[in-house]
């Protein structure tokens, strides 16, 4: 990238039929963003089609020609990846819950009131445009993936491009098999303060320490990459939201207990984690899931940080199911079974193996009905007790 592109302000598109509203928003954001404006959804859509530099959209709902809901539908159904992944903020004077829910269901990334303060509006827009830039960088790097090492030599983690490429394959597989996949974005709290107090070198060492910790906490099938300084993403196949919540809680607790020393001063770090999971029957992209997780981190950061944020807000130890366990690797399970037989350790893992295989068994039964005892197997997987299945069933 040249110096000119590095210094260019991110461009946002503001769509509202009120000239006064557009002028008010522009006045708030013009120091941080380059702005294009349109007066209705149809004109906004045409601008999106011809301007590839737009990184976020702010739109009203009630507009002539094409309203906000119709515009959202076109954006999310577009076959152009730079358009269907764009962050879209709905800004409306109607803050009723049903309007907010409808906008979110239509594909809005965020919903804000027209009475929002200047600081909050800028903070949300900056988070969204940073996400858009990350998404575009990932898309641009995918083409070069075959000639680039999948491992970042500095961190030892996967490169963002490889993570995106590999996660897209896993997500496609999960959709085909009606399986699960979760995304976890991890951010070091108050990282700017860490730099200001100890310097960039120490902050980098803290960042590297967290990289090593994450690498040791993962299963073989998980992938972790560093998206930006102090921000990491983990993609976990065959893991639903409950499993992701349980893992995130364990990870946050582990980080809380770590103490680093610099010139006889003890340094502790805290993290905020945002979670997202693939939804069965809904077409989603890895970029979208990462974006959802980042939005949840922003909420957690606003609430003070040091939190795990899921689909319903903060995840607490009381909310995380104590019975959730990570899926086992079936390949490793079979290898141990062939070499050592059904020893006590493998027997204890049987419920986890059944839970991992259950979506495949359900698919087999639906395609080739053979009387598989799915209800019994599901009960075993849920209770975690091998003897939960009656012998005669």
Image: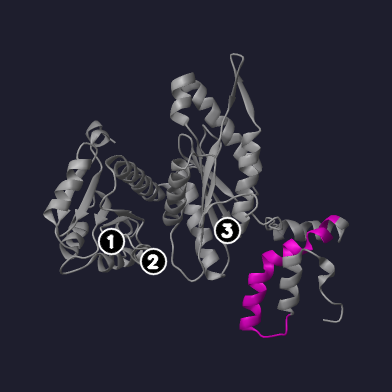
Q: 389 or 93: nearer the eye?
A: 93
From the top left corner, tell me how far across and down residue 337 is, in percent. Answer: 81, 60
- Residue furthest toward the top? 263
Please report contact status of discs 2 and 3: CB closer than 8 Å, yes or no.
no
Mark 3 element type: helix
From the top left corner, tell me how far across and down residue 238 is, in percent. Answer: 61, 60
Q: Is residue 301 above or below residue 258?
A: below
Mark 1 element type: loop
Q: 168 or 134: nearer the eye?
A: 134
Whichever of callouts 2 and 1 sits on the residue coming sooner in the sequence is: 1
Quarter occupied by residue 343:
bottom right
Q: Is residue 351 above or below residue 189?
A: below
The residue that label 3 is drawn on is 241
Q: Residue at x 17, y 52 (%)?
A: 21
Which label was assigned to residue 94?
Answer: 1
Q: Is residue 72 above or below residue 268?
A: below
- Quote the CA–CA distance across marks 2 and 1: 16 Å
- Quote the CA–CA distance across marks 1 and 3: 32 Å
Quarter occupied by residue 106:
bottom left
Number of labels in the image equals 3
Characterize the local packing of mark 1: few (<14), some (14-19) or many (20 or more) Cα atoms within 10 angstroms: some
Whichever of callouts 2 and 3 sits on the residue coming sooner in the sequence is: 2
Residue segment shown in magenta: 345-372
The residue that label 2 is drawn on is 105
């Amino acid at each position: 990238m040249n110096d000119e592109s590095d210094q260019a302000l991110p461009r946002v598109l503001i769509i509202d039929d009120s000239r006064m509203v557009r002028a008010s928003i522009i006045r708030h954001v013009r120091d941080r963003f380059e702005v294009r404006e349109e007066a209705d959804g149809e004109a906004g859509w045409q601008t999106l089609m011809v301007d590839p530099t737009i990184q976020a959209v702010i739109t009203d709902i009630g507009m002539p020609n094409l309203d906000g809901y119709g515009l959202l539908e076109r954006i999310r159904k577009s076959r152009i990846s730079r358009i269907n992944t764009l962050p879209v903020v709905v800004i409306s004077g109607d803050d009723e819950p049903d309007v907010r829910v409808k906008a979110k269901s239509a594909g809005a990334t965020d919903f804000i009131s027209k009475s929002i303060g200047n600081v909050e509006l800028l903070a949300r827009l900056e988070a969204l445009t940073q996400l858009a830039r990350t998404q575009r960088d990932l898309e641009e790097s995918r083409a070069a993936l075959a000639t680039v090492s999948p491992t970042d030599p500095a961190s030892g983690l996967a490169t963002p491009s490889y993570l995106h490429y590999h996660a897209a394959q896993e997500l496609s597989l999960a959709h085909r098999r009606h399986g699960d996949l979760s995304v976890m974005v991890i951010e070091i709290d108050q990282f700017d303060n860490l730099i200001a107090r100890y310097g960039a070198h120490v902050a980098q060492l803290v960042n590297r320490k967290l990289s090593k910790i994450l690498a040791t906490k993962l299963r073989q099938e998980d992938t972790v990459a560093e998206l930006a300084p102090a921000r990491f993403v983990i993609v976990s196949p065959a893991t639903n939201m409950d499993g992701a919540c349980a893992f995130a809680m364990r990870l946050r607790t582990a980080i809380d207990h770590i103490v680093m020393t610099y010139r006889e001063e003890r340094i502790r770090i805290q993290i905020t984690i945002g979670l997202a999971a693939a939804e069965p029957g809904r077409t989603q992209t890895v970029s979208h899931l990462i974006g959802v997780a980042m939005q949840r981190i922003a909420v957690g950061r606003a609430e003070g940080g040091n939190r795990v944020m899921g689909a319903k807000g903060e995840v607490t130890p009381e909310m995380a199911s104590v019975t959730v366990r990570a899926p086992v690797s079936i390949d490793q399970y079979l290898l141990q079974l062939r070499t050592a037989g059904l020893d006590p350790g493998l027997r204890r893992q049987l419920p986890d193996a059944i839970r991992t295989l259950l979506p495949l068994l359900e698919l087999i039964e639906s395609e080739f009905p053979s009387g598989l005892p799915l209800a019994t197997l599901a009960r075993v997987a849920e209770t975690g007790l091998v003897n939960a299945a009656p012998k005669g069933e």
